[in-house]
Image (cartoon, helix red, strand yellow):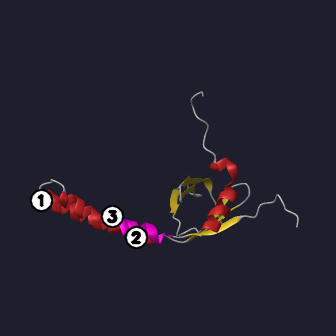
Amino acid sequence: MRSSNVSVPCRFELRPSRWLIGVMLAMSALAPLSVWASEMPRWAAWPLASFAAVAGLRLAWRERGLPVRNVVIDASSDALIDGMAVDDFRIDWRGPLVFLSWRDADGKVHRRSLWPDALGPSLRRELRLAVGKGNAVRSPDSMAP
């Protein structure tokens, strides 16, 4: 069997992570407890604790409502999201987490995160291979050795 140097595009669905939503819900439950455990006066702690719980629930609800996007990355690291070409596509790896950012045709910046439950190991490897070394290598140090 002969190998080819032509790369197949990486295709995956960018969907909200259940793990991230669960973490947000846990944080929205724990935030009021931390406010009440502090030495803040009770007249100020109750409104702040309520606000923290509501803000956490709102963020989890917003994350849950994010649309599923179809992402295609070709061999030259150009990306198509929902069939539209995007500018300034960037992938940042932080351990098991993947952070994507791009600019759409209107100039609006979009950011999404991929948790391990949203992108399996085989797709994660395929994504690493699709972006190549250019995006995965850290910039050189600014100081001389």
Residue carrying label 1: 42
- The relative height of residue 67 versus residue 39 in the rendered view (above or below) is below
Q: Is residue 20 magenta?
A: yes
Q: Position of residue 42 (x, y in %)?
A: 12, 59
- The relative height of residue 127 versus residue 134 in the rendered view (above or below) is below
Which is in the foreground here, disc 2 or disc 1? 2
**Dot 2 amino acid type:** Gly
Q: Earlier in the sequence, mark 2 or mark 1?
A: 2
Residue 22 image label: 2
Residue farthest to the right? 2
Judge left or right: residue 34 versus residue 62. left
Q: Residue at x 42, y 69 (%)?
A: 21
Q: Position of residue 15 (x, y in %)?
A: 53, 70
Judge left or right: residue 69 versus residue 79. left
Q: Main secondary structure of the magenta part?
A: helix
Q: Residue at x 64, y 49 (%)?
A: 135
Depth check, front residue: 16 or 104? 16
Residue carrying label 3: 27
**Dot 3 amino acid type:** Met
Depth check, front residue: 108 or 68? 68
Q: Residue at x 44, y 72 (%)?
A: 64
Magenta-drawn segment: 16-25
SS of the residue under disc 1: helix
In space, the residues marked 1 and 3 are separated at their CA atoms by 21 Å
Task: Look at the image and tell me in which quarter the C terminus lies.
Answer: top right
Q: Are marks 1 and 3 in contact (CB under 8 Å)?
A: no
